[in-house]
Amino acid sequence: MDRNIHAELDAEIQANPIILFMKGDAEMPQCGFSAVVVQILKLLNKPFKTINVLLDAEIRQGIKDYSNWPTIPQLYVAGDFIGGCDIVREMYQTGELRQLIEDKGL
């Protein structure tokens, strides 16, 4: 039976208000960029889900295709793709990320 990766990703993104596709998980990030985004999300003190792309090659490639973004980590808030580490860090530093999350009622 063929998997529909796009549908799987869409379901996860719609079901989780804040979701991070990353290498590793929140307790043990497997790359520095993923660790930075996890740290930022923890500082915002909002619940979030992580998906470890290292556990599933189809998910790892699928999320890149889904977002049309070539790198991991990838953050989604309220179903919208936010970006990777550099974008998330910049948005956090300017207060834009916190404001976005508040504006979405999260």
Image (spheres, rainbow, N blue to C red):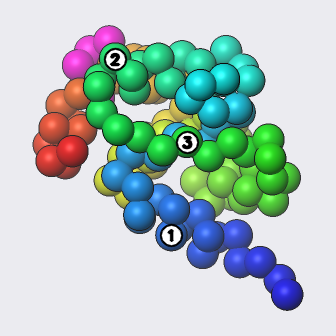
The residue where tag 1 is placed is: 11
Indicate the amino acid at tag 1.
Answer: Ala
Earlier along the polypeptide chain: callout 1 or callout 2? 1
* Image quadrant in which the N terminus is located: bottom right
Does residue 49 appear left or right of residue 32 in this picture? left
What residue sits 62% from the left and 46% below the top? Answer: 51
Query: Going by the picture, which residue comes out furthest to the bottom?
Result: 1
* Image quadrant in which the C terminus is located: top left
What residue sits 41% from the left and 63% below the top? Answer: 15
Indicate the amino acid at tag 2.
Answer: Leu
> Image quarter for residue 29?
top right
Label 2 secondary element: helix
Does residue 52 appear left or right of residue 1 in this picture? left
- Separation of residues labelled 3 and 2 (CA atoms): 16 Å
The residue where tag 3 is placed is: 50
* Residue 100, position as x, y percentages in the image: 23, 37
* 103 vs 86, nearest the viewer: 103
Indicate the amino acid at tag 3.
Answer: Thr
